[in-house]
Amino acid sequence: MILIRIFCGTEDFLVSGQDKTRATVDIYGQPYKIVGTESTSHIRLVASIVDDKMREISKKNPYLDINKLAVLTAVNIVNEYVKLKEEYEMLEKKLHQKEE
């Protein structure tokens, strides 16, 4: 889990964390200063995945405004996350059944 503080313009969004790592990333042409508890490489990887997904969706839907693009990107990424989580839980259940 990434606990981050994002600085975007003059706005400051805080999610608490103790050991802080700072990274400046670019997501869809917009720079973000992210402070989190994960490594710099992890923060950059997450930002890169979000940027890639936004660009992928934008190519297929070039007339989406930035807000709709961001929401559609979030929905797609969470959909992928839920599928992976369900698959993980199914595999974990199968593993426990074999152990019994």
Image: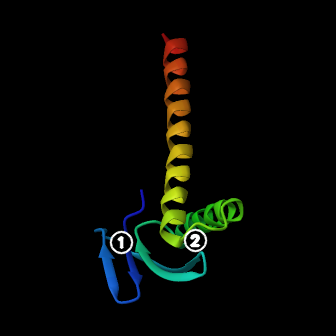
Specify the farthest residue to the bottom.
Answer: 10
- The quarter holding residue 87 reads top right
Foreground of the two, 35 or 21 = 35
Q: Secondary structure at mark 2?
A: helix
Q: Relative to 91, is 43 above or below?
A: below
Question: What is the number of the mark on residue 74?
Answer: none
Q: Secondary structure at mark 1?
A: loop
Task: Name the residue that disc number 1 marks.
Answer: 19
Q: How far across and how far down the image is residue 9, in percent?
A: 40, 88
Q: How far across and how far down the image is residue 97, in percent?
A: 50, 13
- The quarter holding residue 1 reads bottom left
Foreground of the two, 37 or 68 = 68
Q: How far across and how far down the image is residue 49, in percent?
A: 61, 62
Q: Relative to 56, is 78 above or below?
A: above
Specify the farthest residue to the front.
Answer: 63
Q: Earlier in the sequence, mark 1 or mark 2?
A: 1
- Count the labels in the image: 2
Q: Callout 1, which amino acid?
A: Asp
Task: Name the residue that disc number 2 marks.
Answer: 44
User: 23 left or right of 58?
Assistant: left
Distance between the alpha carbons at the discs numbered 1 and 2 = 17 Å
Disc 1 packing (10 Å; few <14; some 14–19; many ≥20): few
Foreground of the two, 16 or 25 = 25
Q: How far across and how far down the image is residue 16, in percent?
A: 28, 68
Residue at image coords 50%, 32% = 86
Residue at image coords 55%, 37% = 83
Residue at image coords 44%, 77% = 34
Q: Callout 2, which amino acid?
A: Arg
Q: Relative to 96, is 57 above or below?
A: below
Residue at image coords 54%, 52% = 77
